[in-house]
Image (cartoon, rainbow, N blue to C red):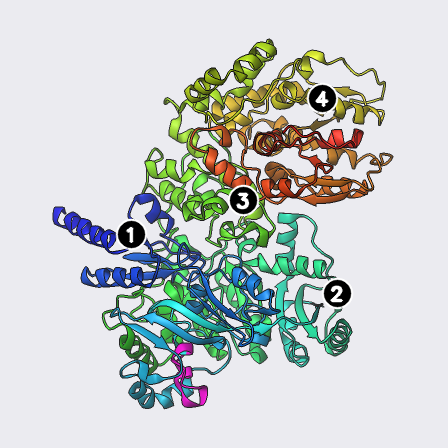
Amino acid sequence: MAGAWKQTEAWEKTVRGAITGEIETDPRRRAEYSSDASNYRVLPRAVVFPRDAADVSATLDIARTHGLAVTARGAGTSVAGNAIGPGLVLDFSRHMNAILELDPERRIARVQPGVVLSALQRQAAHHGLRFGPDPSTQNRATLGGMIGNNACGPHAVAWGRTSDTVRRLRILDGRGLERVLADDLSAIAGLPEFTRNRMALIRTELGRFERQASGYALEHLLPERGSSIARAFVGTEGTCGLLLEATVDLVPVPAATVLVVLGYPDMPTAADDIAAVMAVRPLAVEGMDARLVDVVRTHRGAVPDLPRGGGWLLIEIDGAGAQEARDKAELLRSRAHALDSRIVTDQAQARALWSIRADGAGLAGRTPDGNPAWPGWEDAAVPPDRLGDYLRDFDALMREHGLDGLLYGHFGDGCIHVRLDLPIADAPQRFRAFLEDAARQVVKFDGSLSGEHGDGRARSELLRHMYSPAALDAFAEFKALFDPEDVLNPGVLVHPRPLDADLRLAGLRPLPTTGGFAFPADGDLATAVHRCVGVGKCRADNHASGGFMCPSYLATADEKDSTRGRARVLQEVVRGALDWRSEAVAESLDLCLSCKACHSDCPAGVDMATYKSETLYRRYRGRRRPIDHYSLGRLPRWLAAATRAPRLANLLGTAGPLRRTGLRLAGMDPRRAIPTLAHKSFRRSWRPSTAATPGPGVMLWIDTFTDAFDPEIARATVAVLESLGQRVTIPDRRVCCGLTWISTGQLDDARKRLRATVDALDDHVGAGGVVVGLEPSCTAALRADLPRLLPDDPRAAAVASAVHTLSEFLETQPDWRPPDRSGHTVLVQPHCHQHAVLGFEADRRILRRTGAAVTEITGCCGLAGNFGMQRGHYDISVAVAENGLLPALRTAPETTILIADGFSCRTQADQLAGRRFRHLAQFLLDDGPPRMTR
């Protein structure tokens, strides 16, 4: 053991001295990179972040010397397990992510492997161009990963697969030799002879239909296919070389497009109509099961109107102009055999419909019955003319094995995506039995195990069903020409690992409860953290994705700070590989803002804020906590005392040296200002309403922040409610939602406060009354956290369902009309918790009805309750604000009306930009512009 440790130290030290990038071997980093978007878990020895080709070369040479495997990785969104490995994982996305050249005249781009596709699309769009293939993960998928898997996406029917775009590749082969791959077979020694000797085999077994992605694409070596080594390299899944640079083709952006939606009784019937659809030469043809739409509706709320049917085809059609595109759409509608149809010309509506399909991979992570659904057989493809019959047989196979899943995919070229409730816990018995049967079935239809995701660890062992022994030998010989020592991604495609080895869920045991959160949808925390299937939407640029997730990753671009990275670490914890109190766990969760954005934006429904709270509860239960857990985590207690002498508290809070010392002692950043207390809290100035409206009226939830700092917001809300004739009450004693205790994991104390809250609200709610919250984070805590912390209290669910935002309540009042604010410009910052838990739609509709010109800021403000106040978080807090809030404020004229219901949002804007936001209630009463504070 000692010798092995010295050997490990030796190679690690050698790599550190040889590269300008980084190498990390700590348990946290290895956990983050132990999985991709597949079912598999393989802990690497180290993760390397190369800065340039020299770093890649040096790392590969050292790995070969020390007998270490090397696996290339981009965004880590592979669902087949081809982006994980036991040796060194090279993450190209951190540094090697430059667009080196974009030539609009030649319509080419030259890129490094870590370039994210959406970044290339944005730059190409300035020239009226785009990259053709567009997988649903395009706002985080890298070009290197797309080349590794031969990614396709919806538009492959028009613009081809990634292999169809590649002109030239610069790689390092397994020996560490740099190669330039284009259309000259002699660039690889022995490849011309290999091709001549295998021509008959290649012509009969490879390239039989467009989506035959399994195995190596040796058909591109044939003279009639252009003798292209570059195209044959695409789809080799990192087993033949490490990509350094790629030159790819671009295509013109269509002048005009329309979306045709065709409804059919079921998906097989939709597949039967593919020939009629393809006759109009569409840009994209996607299939979508009605049950998937039901899941989207449950997850998001309303979805755009769809034609009648149990399944739909989404077909994009282009034209030289809008009328030509519309004419082609009408022609398709007349020729198709659909039950119903709809032509969508509004681009916003079209995007909303496409977004249902784009999130399919994550949203289909649960079956309609609520069971977890997994990849593994999610990417089969058959010739399009056999797709309908294949789907019928596949449905029978699922029933035979007792499986279920939600169907979608690229119907235009016969590629089906479905995640199934595979019996991974029963591996290898039922798990293997289904996959073997599924492989035999798809081969019966002349199909492929994979249509674009690759084979990886999930399907490589099954290639024996699809190919002859001679073809498998040819694959091995082809790899040996590039990588004779099997250094690159071993266990994939050639000499495959068993498909039931290294399963992440294998052996996972239920996690005993310790009295923290209830997880009604999952059962326990172990199952909950495994909701993360690695889709990686948390790595997406929120300007591209339109969401709030994940603010810390957007600030650091480090996998550690993504929702997925944190989930991977917690998955190691619940399996017993890491301790709750380990430094790895502390580092992983440190920069989580508990913004809850992942709760709504993650397609798999990961709720990292809750997982963090539960982890902190388990970590510190019965132990001494960090000082800020006592200062910030119990803030309502201190504010209750401070509001008795607000002038004294404000004087102490503004005394420079005293303030800075106090902040340091309390575990806070001394660069922060202490918000100013109101001279009189709302509760101290409250006078009961005199309205005589029958019934219980409206109870106003007076949260700690509104009460102590912004009582004028509560007074404005009372005025709005009383203008409707409502009798307004407040709880008869000071109660709390427990939010600050929840966010710091002090769940026993939070439960006590929530139980007191239920006691205080029970009579009002029982009489049919509603509760209106003013602070979104507190309102969200009552709506979502209350039932999960008091699962055995039958009153908790009733209280939670009675809690509304002001906008939600106003929309229930048929006679209420918002004031006319036409001619005003409004900039609004939705609170993260409202976005994630409560929804912002009601506010959006009310603001729209005022007639004001409204712009929304996308993304977290960066303060996020206690996060931005804690010592060590100031710089990240500011960096998060720079992603949305601060740039918006810099460009907003002084006359712009700024609206933010969240205390954190208002505080951050005031402290960092000197701009004052107002609450929606104030806006509905007073339309004057805010004053500047500096």
Rendered position, 379 above or below 855: below
Sooner in the amino-acid sequence: mark 4 or mark 3: 3
Determine whether 88 is above or below 880 in the image.
below
The x and y percentages for residue 577 are 31, 43
Camera-side residue: 349 or 411?
A: 349
Label 3 sits on a secondary structure element that is helix
Label 2 residue SS: loop
Query: Mark 3–mark 2 contact, CB under 8 Å?
Result: no
Residue drawn at point x = 72 percent, y = 56 percent: 304
The magenta stretch spans which residues? Answer: 216-231
Residues packed near mark 2 inside 10 Å, few (<14), some (14 to 19) or many (20 plus)? some
Q: Residue beneath label 2, please?
A: 345
User: Residue visible at 51% across and 69% down?
Assistant: 102
Give me the C-alpha separation between circle 4 and circle 3.
Answer: 32 Å
* Three-letter residue code for mark 2: Thr
Could you say which disc has been placed on residue 598 in the image? Answer: 3
Q: Secondary structure at mark 1?
A: strand
Upstream in sequence: badge 3 or badge 1: 1
Q: Nearer the viewer, mark 1 or mark 4?
A: 4
Q: Position of residue 151 (x, y in %)?
A: 48, 68
Check residue 76 for magenta coloring: no
In this rendering, does residue 196 appear at all?
Answer: yes
Per the image, the residue denoted by label 1 is: 46
Q: CA distance from mark 1 to mark 4?
A: 55 Å
Query: Crowding near pointer 4: few (<14 within 10 Å), some, many (20+)?
Result: some
* Sequence-earlier tag: 2 or 1: 1
Q: CA distance from mark 2 to mark 1?
A: 50 Å
Residue at mark 4: 712
Which dot, 4 or 3, sits closer to the camera?
4
Name the secondary structure under disc 4: helix
Q: Quadrant of residue 294?
A: bottom right
